[in-house]
Amino acid sequence: MTSIGFVGLGSMGGAMAARLVDAGHHVTVWNRSPGPVATLVHRGAYAAATPEEVLKADISFSMLANDAAADAVLIPSTSADGAHRTHVMMASISPSTADVLDRRFTDAGSTYISAPVLGRPDVAAAGNLNILAAGPSIDSVEPLLLEMGKRVWRLGDKPSIANAVKAIVNYNIIHALQAIGESVTMTERLGVSPELFTELLSSTLFGGVAYTGYGNLIAQRRYMPPGFHMSLGRKDLDLAQQVASSVDFAPATMPVLIEVLDAALADPELAQSDWSAIAEVSRRSHASSPPPQSLKPLP
């Protein structure tokens, strides 16, 4: 039986690892805090004492919060004896960090694949993630990816391309959140129900997960508990800015979205909320407010 490892058992990683355990695979897990490990052991997983132990599996996965976590956990844990092993990074890290990890694992004799995902924790638990995959030998891990998701989107042979595309997708989501927030602000002030207006959007011209799911959250101000933290949204916006810079492009709307997310993070209540709460920045604004310093070229 192919041995499987999973590092990083937060709300997303825990749900994804549980899919593999419930499918009957031999899964060894590690997490910085012990609670999620105990939960998965109860379901049939095996606890590892260190991330190095997890990475010794034939195929290992990681879902870590950001670049710093990936650096701290994975780089020191990469074994010099990685022959015939594969590691799949499923987090939204920067393309530059993905390139570093790719070199590190390749130099150790392992195969490295990037496979960031689209979906929130409930989508992960249901196995309905969309998985953006890039790197060599995707065929060898695709059956396991399809235990966690409904479709694998193959984006090329260079792993970091998947991370760049994921950042661009999230850039589009942030646009949708801002557009819904601005539109709801105007229609509410006209006396139109926000629930009715967001239903109008999602039922006619703007169907799909972003407008349906986030439209409902914004209309009803259901930002807690957060499915995706505001700080992670700001991280992903920074990643999108890095990608734009790498291809010599300055998106016109980038400065506006940076201002809105920074304003949300400066508010103690919004900073702890779901990233869809950026809509409240628009709802609280007035025509007399100073205009945003937008549409300036990026430095």
Image (cartoon, rainbow, N blue to C red):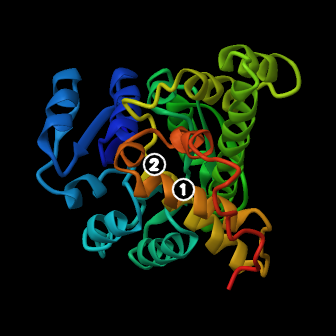
Q: Residue 131 is drawn in which quadrant?
A: top right
Residue 290 appearing in the image: yes
Residue drawn at x 31%, y 46% is 5
Q: Callout 1: helix, strand or loop?
A: helix
Where residue 230 is drawn, which disc sits there? 2
Q: Which mark is residue 261?
A: 1
- Location of residue 266 with respect to 187 vertically, above or below: below
Q: Position of residue 272 (x, y in %)?
A: 36, 44
Task: Please tell me whether residue 2 is drawn above or below residue 223 in the rendered image.
Answer: below
Across and down, in percent, residue 123 comes to 52, 26
Q: In the image, what residue type sits under mark 1? A: Leu
Q: Earlier in the sequence, mark 2 or mark 1?
A: 2
For the N terminus, give its image quadrant: top left
Q: Could you say whether the residue bearing mark 2 is in a helix, strand or loop?
A: helix
Q: CA distance from mark 2 to mark 1?
A: 8 Å
Labels 2 and 1 touching (C-beta < 8 A): yes
User: Badge 2 local density, few (<14 within 10 Å), some, or many (20+)?
Assistant: many
Determine whether 261 is above or below 13 in the image.
below
Query: Residue 186: x and y, percent?
Result: 75, 33
Please tell me which residue is depicted at 63% across the width and 54% down the height of the picture. 166
Q: Position of residue 225 (x, y in %)?
A: 36, 30
Q: Amino acid at mark 2?
A: Met
Compare residues 134 and 91 and report the one nearer the observer: 91
